[in-house]
Image (tube, helix red, strand yellow):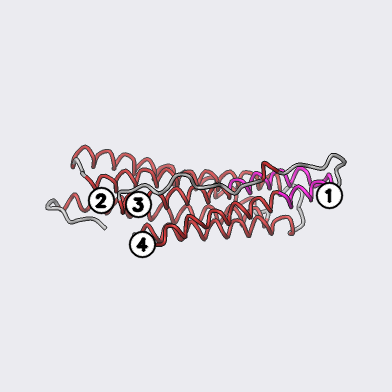
Amino acid sequence: MYSHHTVRAYDDELTYLTRKIAAMGGHAERLVDQSVAALVNADVSLARKVIEDDALLDEAQREIDDKSILVIARRQPMAGDLREIIGTIRIASDLERVGDLAKSVAKRVMVVAEGRQPISLFRGIQALAELALTQLKEVLDVYASRSVERIEFVRDRDNEIDAMYTSLFRELLTYMMEDPRNITPCTHLLFCAKNIERIGDHATNIAETIYYVVTGDQMPADRPKEDKSHRVTLPADGKK
């Protein structure tokens, strides 16, 4: 991962940053998984736990930022080492945002749980979350192995998430048109779906950062987005 340095403490500092990112990644995965489980099962207690545990990710990001700044000031890294440290800061920021998005989903649980909804309303959310979590796990595996040949595959999966989100957006709108009582819960589920879709975007950001760290090159920035929910229009007469 790193070239070995004559100062052992330098290697230890870089290894610390890598391990801290791995720990953050595992915690972010758990928060996403638990927030969706809380939403589907109307588990308010679990939702509160997610909200509280997000503070651990915030603290971890602060520790990484502080440690990274100290390493840069003390060691004056060059080339690959400097990219590694800057990449660590970027990835920590993305993982912290993943935690914020999971917390946002958890906050919706309290409202949705007040009036229990049919499980069919949650199936799309579950499927979207599974895809986003798979992407996040894959990109964290790439970070651990530095297998850059897998990064394009990870990034392309974001298109699948966008397409599923657009489909879910349409489905929830249909529920809302069929029964006005669905409007409030479906509105909250739409916000949850968008948060989960954004988790996929952050996983993609991490993949691009890893590519830069390993190769020193930037991946093409003109990646098309397939989220077409903004194009959805409601019929004038309210019928499907």
Q: Is residue 193 within the magenta segment? A: yes
Q: Are marks 1 and 3 in contact (CB under 8 Å)?
A: no
**Is 191 left or right of 90, judged from the image as shown?**
right
Q: Alpha carbon of mark 1 to alpha carbon of mark 3: how far?
A: 50 Å
SS type, badge 1: loop
Quarter of the picture holding the N terminus = bottom left
Residue receiving disc 2: 14
Say the numbered circle drawn on residue 147.
4
Residue receiving disc 3: 20
The residue carrying pointer 1 sits among few (fewer than 14), some (14 to 19) or many (20 or more) residues within 10 Å by Cα, namely: few
**Is 67 left or right of 220, judged from the image as shown?**
left
Foreground of the two, 106 or 65: 65
Kind of residue sitting beneath label 4:
Ser
Foreground of the two, 157 or 188: 157
Determine if residue 56 is in view: no
SS type, badge 2: helix
- Magenta extent: 170-196
Q: Alpha carbon of mark 2 to alpha carbon of mark 3: how far?
A: 10 Å
The residue sitting at 79% across, 46% down in the picture is 176
Q: Tag 3 or tag 2, which sits nearer the N-term?
A: 2
Q: Alpha carbon of mark 2 to alpha carbon of mark 1: how far?
A: 57 Å
The residue sitting at 58% across, 43% down in the picture is 104
The residue carrying pointer 4 sits among few (fewer than 14), some (14 to 19) or many (20 or more) residues within 10 Å by Cα, namely: some
* Rendered location of residue 139, percent (x, y): 44, 57
Kind of residue sitting beneath label 2:
Leu
Kind of residue sitting beneath label 3:
Lys
